[in-house]
Image (cartoon, rainbow, N blue to C red):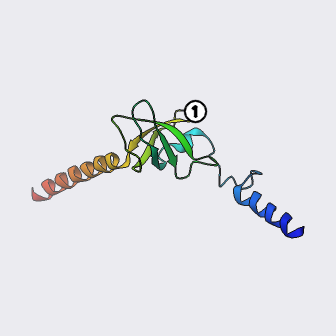
Amino acid sequence: MIASAAATLFAYRRMDIWGGTGEGQTKDSSSLRGQTGRVTERVTPTSGEVKVNEGGFNPYYQARSVDGEIEEGEEVVVVDPGGGNVLTVESFANVRDEIDRELERDREMSEGQSAE
């Protein structure tokens, strides 16, 4: 009896049901902005589903893409949490490409300045 009570208490604390540290919960929808996740059902501009890596107790959200389709299994980043349980996401590959382009522009500018 004591062992089952201890196991139940451990499970409640582990799942953060009483609130405790808040570690397993999303504080509010804006805290989802910038979070990464994976597509669980193909995402289009009108439908889809993602699992957010640190999305709280239920990390599965309906999702819409910024533009185009994102296939199942691809990594995504939340660009607009929306306020409900429908997130707007973008493929992580697109975000990385944009960052890479910016870094390349900076390199070219600094190389051009050092050559002068």
Residue occupying the point 48% across, 37% down: 63
| Farthest right residue in view | 1
Picture quarter containing residue 61? top right
Helix, strand or loop at label 1? It is loop
> Where is residue 4 shown, x and y percent of the image?
84, 65
Q: Is residue 37 left or right of residue 54?
A: left
Locate residue 31: give its quadrant.
Answer: top right
Q: Position of residue 93 (x, y in %)?
A: 33, 49
Amino acid type at image mark 1: Gly
Is the N terminus in the top left, top right, bottom left or bottom right quadrant?
bottom right
Label 1 belongs to which residue? 84
Q: Position of residue 10 (x, y in %)?
A: 77, 63
Q: x, y (%) of residue 98?
A: 29, 46
Task: Residue at 63%, 44% (x, y): give it.
Answer: 27
Q: Please say if 80 is above or below 1.
A: above
> In which image quadrant can residue 112 be found?
bottom left
- Taking 77 as reference, is 11 above or below it? below
Compared to residue 80, the image places residue 14 above or below, namely below
